[in-house]
Image (cartoon, rainbow, N blue to C red):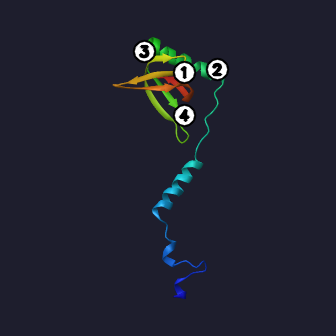
Amino acid sequence: MGKKLEKNGLWESSRMMLPEHKIRIIRDERETLRRIKPILDEQKLEEIECTLALSLRSHVRVTVVLFDPFENTMLSGFVTSIHTHSREFKLQWAEEWKWIDVDDIVEVYIV
């Protein structure tokens, strides 16, 4: 029986990695890959707000780049409503729409 024990006193078969451990390792690696949201200057914020207003007034299609800690998200559509008091706007594409917080935007440009 002594041959089956190693230096740490564990059975040789107990060294395999359990699925729960694999998930935890992947989750820990993903957390280390998180990015920090860039701070936009006043000029960039004004440019974003003007582009959104232009889309609302002129029915111009825009692409919005939203910040995500792991990977930025891109949405493309038309601005159909803006709530200045809550700093959010409604982006519509096809038959779908979504309310988006202006503070989540990294970049916006006209398509």
Q: Nearer the viewer, mark 1 or mark 2?
A: 1
Gap in Å between the C-alphas at discs 3 and 2?
23 Å
Q: Residues within 10 Å of mark 2 (few under 14, many from 20)?
A: few
**Who's the residue at 49% across and 17% down the image?**
82
Left or right, 98 with respect to 106, comes to left
Q: Secondary structure at mark 2?
A: helix
Determine which residue is flagged by label 3.
59
Query: Gap in Å between the C-alphas at discs 4 and 1?
Result: 16 Å
Of label 3 and label 1, which has the lower sequence position? 3
Q: Identify the residue under disc 2.
A: 43
Please state the horizontal and vertical placement of residue 70, each as a whole percent of the image. Answer: 54, 42
**In this figure, which residue is indicated by the disc labeled 1?**
87
Circles 4 and 3: CB atoms closer than 8 Å? no
- Residue highlighted by disc 4: 67
Label 3: which secondary element: loop
The percent position of residue 106, horizontal first and vertical second, equals 56, 29
Q: Amino acid at mark 4?
A: Phe
Which label number is shown at residue 17? none
